[in-house]
Image (cartoon, rainbow, N blue to C red):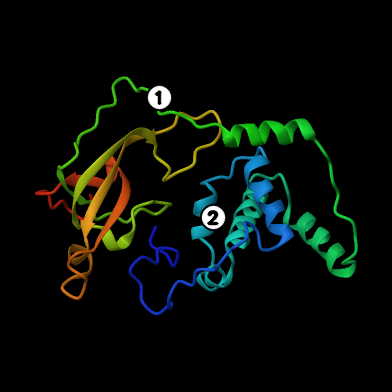
């Protein structure tokens, strides 16, 4: 979708400040939010990224990384009926009134070990019968000029621009929409595509610079194609 989150190429936000020796977490609560995101077995309708991208622009810009994660998970729990807004407000009121109130802890060492083992496992790309890549390394391509209503990994600044395939990663799940558990995943060839800086930003860009994007096949057409923006 087109929203404030799609900030590539936008001006006015200042330089990116790199923090020296940046810790994995800046606050203890961020650890709990990460755990919620990976361990709660409740699928978020539309996917967590879609919830984040639908945040009010002012809320989005003023929120930290894990605050966005927390927003997406809470909305997902409410949307599925797992949690009600009233239950959430009651719990929040308790901690507002009693900042020293203990947070419930339900230790499950076996589940922790299972979750960690899954995160440390390196998955390989399986073979997919019947799915064949349309492009090869070196092929000229053009990013489609589309404006989907939901989540997409296709940034605005590259839509309609010409690039070159530099690598084929294999067949991977298309992550534009996170489907409920049990649904068949949509799989597409995935490529690395190089875009010259002047193709993206015009003559003011540095001539020797380039941007590499990982792009699913559905985002691309042959370079000579200038399809209808609405197709």
- Which label number is shown at residue 126? 1
Q: Nearer the viewer, residue 109 or 38?
A: 109
**Residue under the point 23% across and 63% down:** 209
Give the percent coordinates (x, y) of residue 108.
80, 35
Q: Where is mark 2, residue-wise?
A: 51
Q: Which of 22 and 108 is in front in this view?
A: 22
Dividing the image into 4 quarters, which one contains the N terminus? bottom left
**Residue under the point 19% across and 52% down:** 163
Asked if residue 28 is positioned above or below residue 11 in the image, the reply reads above
Marks 2, 1: nearer the viewer: 1
Chain-order first, disc 2 or disc 1: 2
Using residue 30 as the reference point, say whether residue 54 is left or right of it: left
Q: How many residues crowd around disc 2 within 10 Å: few (fewer than 14), some, or many (20 or more)?
A: many
Give the percent coordinates (x, y) of residue 83.
73, 49
Give the percent coordinates (x, y) of residue 98.
90, 66
SS at mark 1 in the image: loop
Q: Nearer the viewer, residue 182 or 18?
A: 18
**Residue under the point 63% across and 54% down:** 75
Using residue 35 as the reference point, say whether residue 17 is left or right of it: left
Residues at circles 2 and 1 in contact by the CB criterion of under 8 Å: no
Residue located farthest toward the left when viewing the structure as drawn: 224
Q: In which quarter of the image is residue 116?
A: top right
Asked if residue 77 is positioned above or below residue 119 in the image, the reply reads below
Using residue 182 as the reference point, say whether residue 203 is left or right of it: left
Q: Quadrant of residue 158?
A: bottom left
**Residue under the point 83% across and 39% down:** 107
Give the percent coordinates (x, y) of residue 141.
17, 47
Using residue 218 as the reference point, say whether residue 126 is left or right of it: right
Q: Is residue 230 visible?
A: no
């Amino acid at each position: 979708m087109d929203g404030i989150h799609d900030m590539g190429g936008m001006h006015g936000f200042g330089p990116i400040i790199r923090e020296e020796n940046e810790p994995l977490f800046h606050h203890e609560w961020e650890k709990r939010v990460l755990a919620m995101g990976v361990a709660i077995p409740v699928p978020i309708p539309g996917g967590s990224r879609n919830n984040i991208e639908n945040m009010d622009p002012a809320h989005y810009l003023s929120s930290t990384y894990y605050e966005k994660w927390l927003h997406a998970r809470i909305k997902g729990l409410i949307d599925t009926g797992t949690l009600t807004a009233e239950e959430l407000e009651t719990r929040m009121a308790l901690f507002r009134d009693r900042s020293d109130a203990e947070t419930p802890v339900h230790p499950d060492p076996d589940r922790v070990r299972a979750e960690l083992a899954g995160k440390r496992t390196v998955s390989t790309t399986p073979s997919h019968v019947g799915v064949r890549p349309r492009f090869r390394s070196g092929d000229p391509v053009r990013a489609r000029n589309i404006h989907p209503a939901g989540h997409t990994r296709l940034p605005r600044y590259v839509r309609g621009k010409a690039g070159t395939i530099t690598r084929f990663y294999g067949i991977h799940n298309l992550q534009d929409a996170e489907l409920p558990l049990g649904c068949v995943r949509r799989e597409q060839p995935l490529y690395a595509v190089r875009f010259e800086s002047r193709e993206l930003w015009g003559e003011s860009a540095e001539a020797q610079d380039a941007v590499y994007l990982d792009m699913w096949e559905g985002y691309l057409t042959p370079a000579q194609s200038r399809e209808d923006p609405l197709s």
